[in-house]
Amino acid sequence: MSRAFRIHAPGGPEALIWEEVSVPEPADGQVRLRHTAVGLNYIDVYHRTGLYPLPSLPAVPGMEGAGVVEAVGRGVSEFGPGDRVAYAGVLGAYAETRVIAADRLVALPPAITDPQAAAMMLKGMTAQYLLRRTYPVQAGDRVMVHAAAGGVGLILCQWARHLGATVIGTVGTDAKADLARAHGCHHPIVYTRERFVDRVRAITGGDGVAVVYDSVGKDTFLDSLDCLRPLGMMVTFGNASGPVPPVEPALLSAKGSLFLTRPTLMTYTAKPADLQASARELFDVVAGGHVRIRIGARYPLSETPQAHRDLESRATTGSTVLLP
């Protein structure tokens, strides 16, 4: 037996129930993994509340983790007991032990610690596909990052600056502005004090930005469109303030023949080769010192409901790690 948090019905943090669960032996193509660190992400909140309905209930939430392989099923040759591995985008991380498909795992290089991996796999590979595939950032581009002091935001700011972009970011407080600036954001905007559209237009001389990376959703979507240059790309990849209402396509033409996409990591890493390539590029920029992974808080795994409360109240910065 092992312990895990399960959701029996959607709700608040109290819907996370810490209980004993049985862990089966790994089937063909599977690995049994003992977690050493688990990542906390806003998608976990969406799953808990039912905004993103889970396939069935009860279910173990959590989408990323790192750990040690304990056993492998038939047909698994790439990993063996004792190997350090990590993953992202596979439901079931809020557990001490789990089984998982081997082709969803990546081997951890010695330069990456387990807490680092749990803090960056989902957020870091999200940043990788956003910057390198959804809109391939080029030197000289101006880019905008909402929630620039958050887990994905801090990685996006550093990586975009490394690619040669000018980075504009929105944050809620002066302290978060300092944090974003220290992690590559050239122009942090405190949105509680100034209208970010006006500041973006001033910073860019009226031209607008090439791309907006928006994990906030409803509260920022329409104003974000006004920050884009003609033919710019609006990338909405999260709903921290709620889902974006329906959009009339003609609005995009009226604002400059804009592009709009709603991507997910799961699509970009569905093929094992894409997953491995994404993780490899992430590990390279972290090991090379171009991107620092900031772990803003660590909680015992058993205190995950409190971690959810802190995440939803915007009391966290950077990445949060849950430790079994």
Image (cartoon, grey):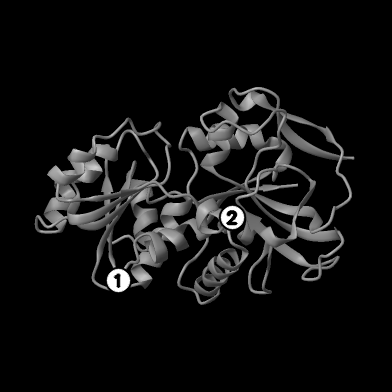
Q: Is residue 81 visible?
A: yes
Residue at image position (16%, 46%) is 253
Secondary structure, mark 1, is: loop
Secondary structure, mark 2, is: helix
Q: Is residue 195 visible?
A: no
Quarter of the image for the N terminus: give it. Answer: top right
Q: Is residue 322 above or below residue 181?
A: above
Q: Nearer the viewer, residue 120 or 222?
A: 222
Total tally of numbered discs in the picture: 2
The local crowd at label 1, few if under 14, some if 14 to 19, many if 20 or more residues have their Cα within 10 Å, is some
Residue for badge 1: 138
Residue at image position (41%, 50%) is 149
| Residue at the bottom extreme of this rendering | 288
Q: Nearer the viewer, residue 269 or 83?
A: 269
Residue for badge 2: 119
Q: Position of residue 282 (x, y in %)?
A: 53, 68
Q: Position of residue 310 (x, y in %)?
A: 54, 35
Q: Is residue 238 above or below residue 30?
A: above
Q: Position of residue 19 (x, y in %)?
A: 80, 31
Specify whether 261 is left or right of 58: left
Q: Amino acid at mark 2?
A: Ala
Q: Nearer the viewer, residue 310 or 223?
A: 223
Residue at image position (17%, 49%) is 199
Q: Amino acid at mark 1?
A: Gln
Looking at the image, is mark 2 or mark 1 nearer the viewer? 1
Specify whether 109 is left or right of 197: right
N-terminal label among 2 and 1 = 2
Image-quadrant location for residue 138: bottom left
Q: Position of residue 74 (x, y in %)?
A: 87, 62
Q: Mark 2 to mark 1: distance in Å?
A: 26 Å
